[in-house]
Image (spheres, rainbow, N blue to C red):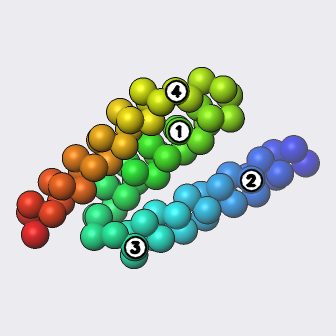
């Protein structure tokens, strides 16, 4: 019974992941790979916040990366 529950949880998590990627690509001009990178960064920041290890420096570093990614996208258009 536990295995079935794990499969259900995994499927639900994957569906949520796909919907978040779709939202990012619809709201931005990012491609699939870039949207996945942004999603993973945001998820990482969320985990760091929940575990109490999130610092201003980490937020600034990740925000700089996201900004750089967006500016590269803009320069290719």
Picture coordinates of residue 22, whole percent (x, y): 45, 70
> Label 2 neighbourhood size at 10 Å, few (<14), some (14-19), many (20+)?
few
Q: Position of residue 39 (x, y in %)?
A: 46, 52
User: How far apart are the alpha carbons under marks 1 and 3?
Assistant: 20 Å
Looking at the image, is mark 1 or mark 4 nearer the viewer? Answer: 4
Residue corresponding to mark 1: 45
Q: Quadrant of residue 25?
A: bottom left
Counting every numbered tag in the picture gives: 4
Q: Residue furthest toward the bottom? A: 26
Q: CA distance from mark 4 to mark 2?
A: 30 Å
Whole-percent x and y of residue 10? 68, 52
Residue tagged 2: 9
Q: Are marks 2 and 1 in contact (CB under 8 Å)?
A: no
Q: CA distance from mark 2 to mark 3?
A: 27 Å
Q: Identify the element where label 4 is drawn.
A: loop
- Which residue in the structure is indicated by mark 3? 27
Counting residues from the start of the chain, the first of labels 3 and 4 encountered is 3
Could you say which disc has been placed on residue 55 in the image?
4
- Residue at coordinates 43% horizontally, 66% vertically from top-left? 24
The residue lying toward the viewer, choosing from 14 and 34, is 34
The crowd level at tag 1 (other Cα within 10 Å; few <14, some 14-19, many 20+) is some
Q: Identify the mark nearer the N-term, 1 or 3.
A: 3
Q: Secondary structure at mark 2?
A: helix
C-alpha span from label 1 to label 4 = 10 Å
Q: Which comes sooner in the sequence, label 2 or label 1?
A: 2
- Which of disc 2 and disc 4 is earlier in sequence? 2
The secondary element bearing badge 1 is classed as helix
| Left/right of residue 68 with respect to residue 51 in the rendered view | left
Q: Nearer the viewer, mark 4 or mark 2?
A: 4
């Amino acid at each position: 019974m536990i295995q079935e529950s794990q499969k259900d949880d995994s499927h639900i998590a994957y569906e949520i992941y796909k919907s978040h990627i779709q939202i990012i690509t619809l709201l931005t001009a990012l491609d699939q790979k870039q949207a996945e990178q942004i999603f993973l960064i945001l998820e990482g920041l969320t985990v760091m916040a929940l575990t109490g290890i999130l610092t201003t420096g980490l937020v600034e570093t990740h925000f700089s990366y996201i900004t750089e990614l967006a500016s590269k996208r803009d320069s290719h258009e």
